[in-house]
């Protein structure tokens, strides 16, 4: 039969057995003790075990950090087989007195428990690999952590874009989700763990070393806390000096039972789970971002198709003119638009350019196009644009305005137009080039704005090229703009009698060639109208 002895476990989970052979067995930091322990918080002569007859008495010798048996503070205690002794906060000792067969039974039971914990950990790690939804990943991590550690509650805090920890999800026993309002606890421990990147265990918050700092948590009935950082490791091709682990949050567990999370095996398992959880959380985040990006792309494509559907596919068919136009948005949705109207034998056409680009500009452009289609029939260009301006001003859309060019071409060649702050269209004919500038201010900002119109007479073959500033202001790598002159060069270089649709493509091709390698900076729209002659 073996004698009295102490089973000593170090922080790495390794154990050694120290026999108690003397009648007085001392424990402390000094090397002269029967059992020397190296932690700085342990007193030089911390405690002693004294044999009295067949009994062994453990006495605290006025230590600073205290002596505990089965997580109870003691001054003097008669030891029994299997008692757990704690010297200070970290030294785990077990008093053994019975023979090896009973010890072996206990060891076997412990091994079975370890195997169950390992099985739970492996099951959790496998499950994490199948989850894609972030909330599902977080819930699985906490649930397996609670099962693995026998904790009562757990939560995960993740770092937000501002770099601060933010409560994300809390869970209790039986996989009950706990809201941030009901899951009350101190933020001190999670903040410390996140800042240091090191796990933190508080086996007993009632310990005088912790009680004052965690009064709020103690009032909630919490006794034991274990918190581990969630660190994302970025793998690189070669070894580097710096630590590439990036903290993304913390996993927190607590219990009302003292010392329930003190097992080194459990802590190792939780740290392993936390490491894999960080990867799973990041993967779920990336998956969610990719799904959100795909959804936005689908919505933008749908919006693009809708906007293109609002643009006319072809002008009205008349013998006295031909026309064509195309709009190339800078983003998925453009702020430029064009439209045609059949006005009792005359041909109406408009090109608008909304300030800005993207979805907001596209929505406003669609609205202006709607107002134009409703107000233009029966009204001249100046009146139509004045009506559009009044309607937009009433809406009070700050810093949102539109430039417009609206023209009406009659069979006899008369072109009545109004230019509201738009790039002057180029009228190219046998008599040279003329820029159409008559009109007024941009549309949508000034209630007092007035608009004029002008009538010009076209000759057969005259061609009107209307364009948005995305054409003339398109820049190359040197910062030089395409400009009106290059638009005219495209026209002059084209074969005689080229159709408007082909001329539109020539101008667009000229812009692409000029800006090759540079991103498109604005919506590009070209509208060409050619007068063929009256009947």
Image (cartoon, rainbow, N blue to C red):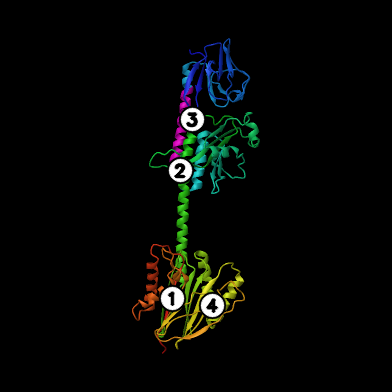
Question: At x 64% / y 34%, what residue is drawn?
Answer: 213
Classified by dominant secondary structure, the portion drawn in magenta counts as: helix
Q: Residues within 10 Å of mark 4 (few under 14, many from 20)?
A: few
Above or below, comparing residue 397 to residue 226 in the picture: below
Label 2 sits on residue:
279
Secondary structure type for disc 4? helix
Q: Which residues are magenta?
A: 106-128
Chain-order first, disc 1 or disc 3: 3
Question: Residue 60's quadrant in the figure?
Answer: top right
Label 4 sits on residue:
374
Q: Could you tell me how far apart the alpha carbons at marks 2 and 3 are, in whole angstroms?
A: 22 Å
User: Label 3 near label 4: C-beta < 8 Å?
Assistant: no
| 401 in magenta | no
x and y percent of residue 489 in the render?
A: 38, 75
Label 1 sits on residue:
527
Q: Residues within 10 Å of mark 2 (few under 14, many from 20)?
A: some
Q: Number of numbered discs present?
A: 4
- Residue placed most toward the observer, 183 or 1: 183
Above or below, comparing residue 426 to residue 534 in the picture: above
Chain-order first, disc 2 or disc 3: 3
User: Label 3 near label 2: C-beta < 8 Å?
Assistant: no
Q: Which mark is residue 265?
A: 3
- In this rendering, which labeled residue sits more in front, label 2 or label 3? 2
Secondary structure type for disc 1? strand
Q: Which mark is residue 230?
A: none
x and y percent of residue 180 in the render?
A: 60, 45
Chain-order first, disc 1 or disc 4: 4
């Amino acid at each position: 039969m073996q004698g009295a002895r102490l089973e000593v476990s170090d922080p790495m989970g390794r154990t050694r057995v120290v026999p108690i052979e003397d009648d007085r067995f001392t424990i402390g930091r000094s090397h002269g003790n029967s059992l020397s322990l190296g932690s700085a918080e342990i007193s030089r002569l911390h405690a002693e075990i004294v044999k009295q007859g067949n009994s062994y008495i453990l006495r605290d010798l006025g230590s600073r950090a205290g002596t505990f048996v089965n997580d109870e503070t003691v001054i003097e205690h008669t030891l029994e087989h299997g008692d757990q002794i704690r010297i200070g906060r970290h030294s785990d000792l077990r008093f053994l007195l019975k023979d090896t067969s009973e010890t072996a039974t206990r060891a076997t039971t412990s091994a079975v428990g370890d195997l169950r914990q390992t099985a739970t950990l492996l099951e959790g790690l496998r499950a994490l690999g199948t989850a894609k939804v972030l909330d599902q990943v977080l819930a699985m991590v906490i649930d397996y952590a609670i099962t693995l550690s026998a904790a009562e509650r757990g939560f995960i805090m993740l770092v937000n874009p501002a770099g601060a920890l933010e409560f994300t999800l809390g869970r209790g026993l039986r996989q009950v989700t706990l809201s941030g309002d009901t899951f009350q606890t101190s933020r001190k421990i999670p903040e410390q763990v996140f800042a240091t990147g090191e796990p933190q265990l508080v086996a007993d918050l009632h310990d005088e070393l912790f009680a004052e700092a965690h009064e709020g948590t103690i009032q909630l009935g919490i006794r034991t806390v274990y918190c581990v950082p969630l660190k994302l490791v970025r793998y690189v091709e070669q070894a580097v000096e710096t630590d590439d682990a990036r903290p993304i949050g913390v996993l927190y567990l607590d219990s009302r039972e003292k010392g329930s999370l003190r097992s080194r095996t459990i802590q190792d398992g939780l740290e392993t789970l936390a490491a894999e959880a960080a990867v799973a959380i990041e993967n779920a985040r990336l998956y969610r971002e990719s799904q959100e990006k795909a959804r936005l792309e689908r919505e933008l494509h749908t919006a693009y198709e809708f906007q293109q559907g609002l643009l006319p596919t072809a002008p009205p068919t008349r013998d006295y003119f031909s026309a064509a136009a195309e709009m190339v948005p800078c983003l998925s949705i453009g702020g430029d638009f064009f439209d045609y109207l059949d006005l009792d034998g005359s041909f109406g056409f408009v090109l608008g350019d909304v300030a800005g680009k993207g979805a907001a500009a596209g929505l406003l452009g669609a609205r202006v196009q709607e107002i134009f289609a409703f107000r233009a029939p029966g009204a001249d260009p100046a009146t139509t644009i004045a009506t559009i301006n009044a309607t937009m001003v009433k809406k009070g859309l700050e810093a949102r305005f539109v430039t417009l060019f609206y023209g009406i071409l009659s069979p006899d060649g008369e072109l009545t137009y109004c230019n509201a702050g738009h790039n002057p269209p180029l009228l190219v004919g046998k008599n040279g080039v003329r820029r159409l500038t008559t009109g007024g201010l941009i549309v949508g900002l000034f209630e007092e704005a007035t608009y004029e119109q002008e009538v010009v007479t076209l000759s057969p073959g005259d061609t009107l090229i209307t364009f948005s500033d995305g054409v003339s202001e398109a820049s190359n790598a040197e910062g030089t703009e395409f400009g009106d002159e290059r638009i005219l060069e495209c026209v002059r270089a084209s074969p005689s009698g080229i159709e408007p649709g082909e001329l539109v493509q020539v101008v667009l091709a000229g812009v692409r060639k000029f800006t090759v390698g540079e991103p498109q900076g604005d919506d590009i729209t070209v509208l060409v109208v050619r007068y063929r002659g009256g009947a």
